[in-house]
Amino acid sequence: MTGPMSRTEARSRSGNPVIRRLSLWTVPLTSHETYHMAAGKTCATVDTVVIALETDTGLTGWGEVCPIPHYLPAYANGVAPALQEVAHLLIGADPVGPEALMAKLDAWLMGHVYAKSAVDIALWDLTAQVAGLPLYALLGGKRSDQLPLYHSVTSVAPDEMARIAREAQKQGVTQFQAKLGASGDWQTDVERLVKVREAIGEGPLLYGDWNCGADRLHATRVGRAVCDRDVMLEQPCRTLDECAAVRSATGLPMKIDELAHDTASLLEAQALGCLDAVALKLSKFGGLSALRRARDLCLHLGTKMCIEDTWGSDIAMAAALHLAAATDPRLVLNVCDLSGYVAPRLDPTAPTRIGAFICPPQGPGLGVYPDRDLLGTPQLVLD
Ligand code: 0XW
Ligand code: MG
């Protein structure tokens, strides 16, 4: 029985609220500057999906997922149908302790981790609100007040990339991701890395990201041409074997992104010797529950972590910031100022960067308060 009686009973049994309603909105996010990656892939306007889980006690838990469909197998329009499949497990359920409920979702509907990521974030928001604590307190406790940001430099002409990097450096940024591969030839990628390095000088972290768009020979030629410089490579090729081959041929440290999406892939990359750093993205792993487990494994492996999401705005960013703030700072490589790349802001009061750093929100839960006027009428309501 799923009527109001059983919901009330559920609450009285656990003392916790129960979920009454799931609402969903799609918001187009437009990049301030069109963002170019390898193989002609660009991000101009990308849809983000926002969800709200409301409880019978008047709490609202927020979640967000913003897939880039040509970057990972996920797309914004896939979120609503996946959530419709599992809505009966959510409505009437106790949101406190997200992993218990997420296990039920996984048992009913395998995969679809990006859609589940938004739900899992909202459940953590509610759990921490019920506890009356900022979310980082439940993810390990605050280890850092300020989190280091990287700046992602779009793959355009090398001189323009050098100019963009210099501008970001003026804001205080000390970590730079140079997107490679937009022009196809390996020599221009060498020029990109050399010119950006010259522009920022020695010291700042610089890594070149191909987003799987290079073959092994291309990436090895580029890596060997810059191997006397302080450069890291990110996800050059489509397989971990190829990435590991590039790492050993060039001797350059390697960050894995697209191919790191669960504990098994982290262990495989570690066994292949190419897991110097990793991008821990919420929607790749399936939300904070899964990302917290990945974080703990990386602490054990000694892997430097970039804790972020694929794309998005203030809700996804807040979730990543809470986890990063609760992680041993010696292994936090950086976080991403996602909402700084795009407009509109979902919550104009959410944290913004202070120079090269950003802080997690302070209120209970995620501590984000999305602008209801901006969201307007939900596109889907399940209750
Ligand atoms: C997923 N991206 C394209 C957006 C983030 O800013 C970083 C980047 C990546 O691939 O690392
Ligand atoms: Mg990447």
Image (tube, grey):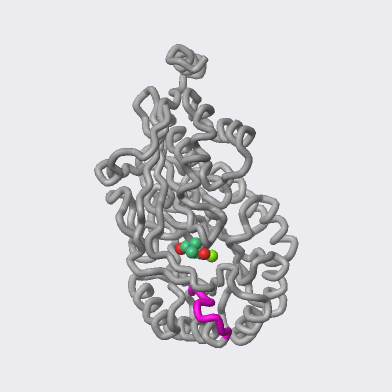
The quadrant of the rendered image in which ligand 2 is seen is bottom right
- Residue at image coords 53%, 61%: 71
Q: Position of residue 200 (x, y in %)?
A: 43, 80
Tell me: 357 left or right of 225.
left
Q: Is residue 249 above or below residue 244?
A: below
Residue, far left: 373
Residue located 51% across and 56% down the image: 307
Q: Give percent across and percent down for residue 332.
A: 53, 58
The magenta-colored residue range is 178-186
Residue 376: in sight, yes or no?
yes
Q: Nearer the viewer, residue 38 or 204?
A: 38
Observer-nearest of 195 and 298: 195
What is the quadrant of residue 355 in the picture? bottom left
Residue 149 x %, y %: 43, 63
Residue 225 shown in magenta: no
In this rendered view, identify the residue nearer to me: 104 or 228: 104
Q: Quadrant of the C terminus?
A: top left
200 relative to 365, above or below: below
Could you tell me what secondary structure mostly forms the magenta stretch? Answer: loop
Residue 354 in the image, given as x and y percentages of width and height: 33, 61
Could you tell me how many numbered marks the image carries? 0
